[in-house]
Image (cartoon, rainbow, N blue to C red):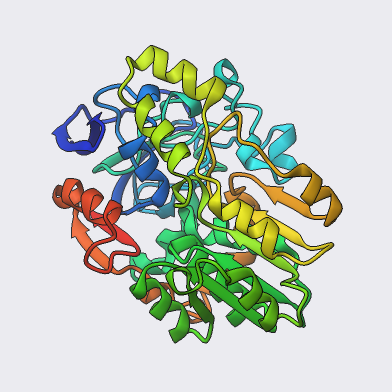
Amino acid sequence: MKALTWHGKRDVRIDTVPDPVLTDPTDVIVEVTSTGLCGSDLHLYEVLGPFLSEGDILGHEPMGVVRDVGRDVTALTPGDRVVVPFNVSCGTCFTCRQGLHSQCETTQVREYGSGAALFGYTKLYGQVPGGQAELLRVPFGNSLPIKVPQGPPDDRFVFLSDVLPTAWQAVQYADVPEDGSLVVLGLGPIGDMSTRIADDHLGVAKVIGVDLVPERLERARSHGVTALNLDDHDKDLPDVIRELTDGRGPHAVIDAVGMEAHGSPAATLAQRMTTLLPSRLAASLMERVGVDCMHALHLAIDIVRRGGTISLSGVYGGMTDPLPLLTMFDKQIQLRMGQANVRRWVPDILPLLLDGDPLGVDAFATHHLPLSEAPRAYEMFQQKQDGAVKVLFQP
């Protein structure tokens, strides 16, 4: 089969690799029909090379049609249409039963002290072959894949793999009262969808988005969100937002940026320097003393009102990131974070996708490309070119 594989920093290629096979009685083989390019994939493209091996298959946002099933699979049959969550979760262990699928005790990567394994995402998370491929082996066929109906286009359902549950969890963790206010830092796919869920579905009274990219700002404004360009307010953004929120700041802030944030040249340099070291040394350094660009998180701490909540959905990877704990304690800030527990939120989200398109998922992707163009798409997305906000590949 054809698959998108990692070969080095900013070097991904379409290779011919062996087809996956059933290795466990509850496995299923999915023929991928659509698969997304995620901002987290850019972390692999740019800085997490020490935890990858040449030839690793990337991608964690696939959907498709079941081609084959193991002998113990009873929930699916060949021909069923499914979305595959990015968490590899069993659905039956203690943490899964608590709705913490991202902490699945069956697939935790204990060698690295990590939570549940992820499709297509480094040794830190199990080095499981990913979904930017023609075929994908999916374990736990009775509990992991999300069966969806025939009919609507893939775009209606594919975002159940990551974007929708990640944004949903971010908004739920923010816990904004209906008459309250929410600021979303970063209007990429997760931030954009978070504003839609908060504004269009939950009816949060005031939703403010912040970004640097004109196309992302316009997308948010088209959905009724107050969108602020960080370039226009680099020094006074907290004051501007406080003026829009009764002088106190918002009830909650979602940081949908994470370690891609700009604003810390030292952290950016440290990230880049690790990519120049031998893999084993770089991995050790990143595990023990890694640092992030934390401009967005520090901004969230400044912006949020006293007694407010910060919901952290952007990915951070540093082990020695300094936090202003005195300020956080003094402001009595609540901080909630973590990988999305995809299966936890599906019962809340799926009915919305079956009742029209209230969140605008049918037109959410900005680019649809054949998988053969994935290497170019990674570069385009990383450089924020051609208005790329969300890219879907068709293998």
Question: Residue 109's x, y, as percent?
Answer: 56, 23
Locate residue 275: give its quadrant.
Answer: top left
Question: Residue 298's x, y, as percent?
Answer: 63, 52
Reply above or below: 70 against 112. Answer: below
Q: Is residue 244 left or right of residue 290?
A: right
Reply above or below: 149 against 35. Answer: below
Q: What is the tally of numbered marks visible in this picture?
A: 0
Q: Is residue 182 left or right of residue 154?
A: right
Q: Residue at x 71, y 62 (%)?
A: 174
Q: Residue at x 15, y 33 (%)?
A: 15
Reply above or below: 8 against 75. Answer: above
Q: Residue at x 58, y 50 (%)?
A: 342
Q: Nearer the viewer, residue 76 or 107?
A: 107
Q: Nearer the viewer, residue 263 or 254?
A: 263
The answer to whether any part of residue 173 appears in the image is no
Q: Residue at x 47, y 47 (%)?
A: 76
Locate residue 367: give its quadrant.
Answer: bottom left
The answer to whether any part of residue 394 appears in the image is yes
Q: Nearer the viewer, residue 334 or 171?
A: 334
Looking at the rendering, in which quadrant would you find the N terminus? top left
